[in-house]
């Protein structure tokens, strides 16, 4: 049985006609940059995220970088960020001239915590960037409270959390600005690179839009109030995203069903499943286990033709551009980097496929394998 890590074809087959219509609209209107398709998506995504404004952008990386620029973060500033994230989170900080300060994470969720933020704060801290990893939002109540006491901004990296909630509030809506990637493999994915920011601050949204469009002011395309670039959302990608957005809740429900099947199937096996804090509604972008026998399991999954990923084997504070002798220890991040393994996850994943994954894990590790140390166990 060949089980892919992600199966996007099944999702696209559901909306084949809608996707064809998007292509025809683009051809017939000749509006490839901006226009109705972009406006429709921005309005729909802002409503979905329970925010007033959305600005469509060319990628999730652009969303992060322009959010920092619009807020005014730059040289001399520090931004607290978890070290176990995709490099784009950190690269955006460096791109605006600021310095990342890496924080350790909670051992049960692998998410940034208020305690981690407090340990990383300095007089130069200008912002905190919690990353909603694997589809689960961080504890934004405590992080926002800590940041407010320190007088620093909070920007959410919600690139993996489309349709996730913390205490009833959508990911991306719980801070000054939320940043999303719509890379094709995301829960809501375009047919190429795409991204967006959401916010309730109109002036901030206008500034981000100007920065993404050569610094143009809204009413005169020949006037440039600030220096900007070309980080706009393509109309075709916006149309694809609008078509997919109508199915996002159903697809996320499919992921949640798969996550529960994984929890049932892996119970009693010598791996630790990263599960959700009960205060969250997780969108399960990834399903992640931890095992001290990762290399052995990778080899077995490969032989069984089962897809997998590692998110992420080299934490950002160990990546060459960011490595420093002054970096304080981050024990949870380091242990996670050596033990995490992402299993197949997509909305149409079947019980038979999940049972096969569990069978390979059981056969490979068996009961003789010792579980991970207690501090790496998942939330019950």
Image (tube, grey):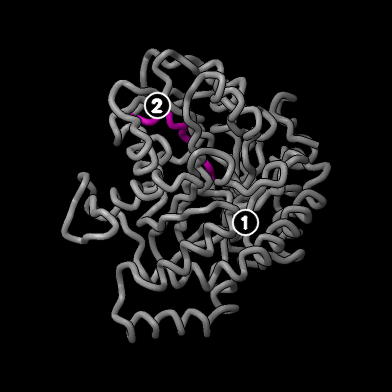
Residue 363: say if magenta: no
Main SS type for the magenta part? Answer: loop
Badge nearest the viewer, 2 or 1: 2
Chain-order first, disc 2 or disc 1: 2
Query: Which residue: 76% across, 64% down?
Result: 351
Q: Quadrant of the C terminus?
A: top right
Secondary structure of residue under mark 1: loop
**On screen, 105 above or below 242?**
above
Q: Residue furthest left?
A: 222
Q: Name the disc covering residue 135, or none.
A: none
Residue 316 counted in the magenta span = yes
- Residue 81's x, y, as percent? 48, 29
What range of the chain is rendered magenta?
310-321
Determine which residue is flagged by label 2: 100
**Whole-percent x, y for residue 356 in the image:** 72, 59
Would residue 320 be found to the left or right of residue 5 on screen?
left
**Label 1 CA crowd tier, 10 Å (few <14, some 14–19, many 20+):** many
Relative to 192, is 373 above or below? Answer: above
Q: Position of residue 12 (x, y in %)?
A: 54, 75
Q: Check the picture and name the quadrant holding the N terminus.
A: bottom right
Asked whether residue 20 appears in the rendered view, the answer is yes
Q: Which residue is mark 1?
A: 344
Q: Is residue 98 left or right of residue 190?
A: left
Question: Compared to 83, does 210 lie above or below?
Answer: below
Name the foreground residue: 258 vs 251. 251
Front residue of this view, candidates 163 and 316: 163
């Amino acid at each position: 049985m060949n089980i892919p890590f992600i199966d996007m074809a099944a999702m696209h087959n559901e909306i084949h006609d809608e996707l064809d219509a998007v292509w025809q609209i683009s051809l017939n209107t000749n509006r490839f940059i901006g226009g109705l398709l972009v406006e429709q998506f921005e309005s729909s995504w802002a409503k979905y995220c329970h925010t007033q404004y959305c600005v469509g952008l060319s990628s999730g990386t652009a969303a992060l970088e322009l959010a920092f620029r619009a807020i005014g973060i730059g040289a001399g500033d520090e931004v607290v960020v978890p070290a176990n994230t995709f490099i784009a989170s950190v690269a955006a900080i460096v791109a605006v001239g600021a310095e990342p300060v890496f924080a350790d994470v909670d051992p049960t969720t692998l998410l940034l915590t208020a305690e981690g933020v407090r340990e990383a704060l300095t007089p130069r801290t200008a912002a905190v960037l919690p990353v909603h990893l694997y589809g689960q939002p961080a504890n934004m109540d405590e992080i926002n409270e800590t940041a407010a006491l320190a007088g620093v901004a909070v920007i959410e990296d919600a690139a993996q959390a489309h349709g996730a909630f913390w205490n009833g509030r959508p990911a991306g809506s719980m801070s000054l600005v939320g940043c999303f990637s719509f890379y094709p493999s995301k829960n809501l994915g375009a047919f190429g690179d795409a991204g967006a920011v959401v916010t309730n601050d109109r002036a901030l949204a206008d500034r981000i839009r100007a920065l993404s469009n050569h610094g143009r002011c809204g009413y005169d395309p020949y006037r440039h109030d600030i220096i900007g670039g070309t980080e706009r959302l393509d109309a075709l990608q916006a149309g694809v995203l609008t078509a997919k957005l109508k199915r996002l809740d159903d697809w996320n429900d499919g992921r949640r069903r798969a996550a529960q099947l994984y929890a049932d199937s892996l119970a009693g096996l010598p791996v630790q499943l990263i599960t959700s804090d009960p205060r969250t509604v997780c969108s399960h972008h990834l399903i992640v286990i931890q095992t001290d026998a990762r290399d052995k399991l990778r080899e077995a999954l490969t032989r069984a033709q089962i897809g997998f990923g590692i998110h992420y084997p080299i934490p950002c504070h160990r990546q060459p551009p960011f490595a420093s002798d002054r970096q304080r220890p981050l024990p949870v991040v380091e242990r996670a980097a050596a033990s995490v393994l992402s299993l197949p996850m997509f909305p149409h994943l079947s019980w038979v496929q999940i049972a096969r994954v569990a069978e390979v894990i059981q056969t490979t590790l068996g009961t003789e394998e010792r579980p991970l140390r207690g501090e790496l166990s998942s939330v019950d």
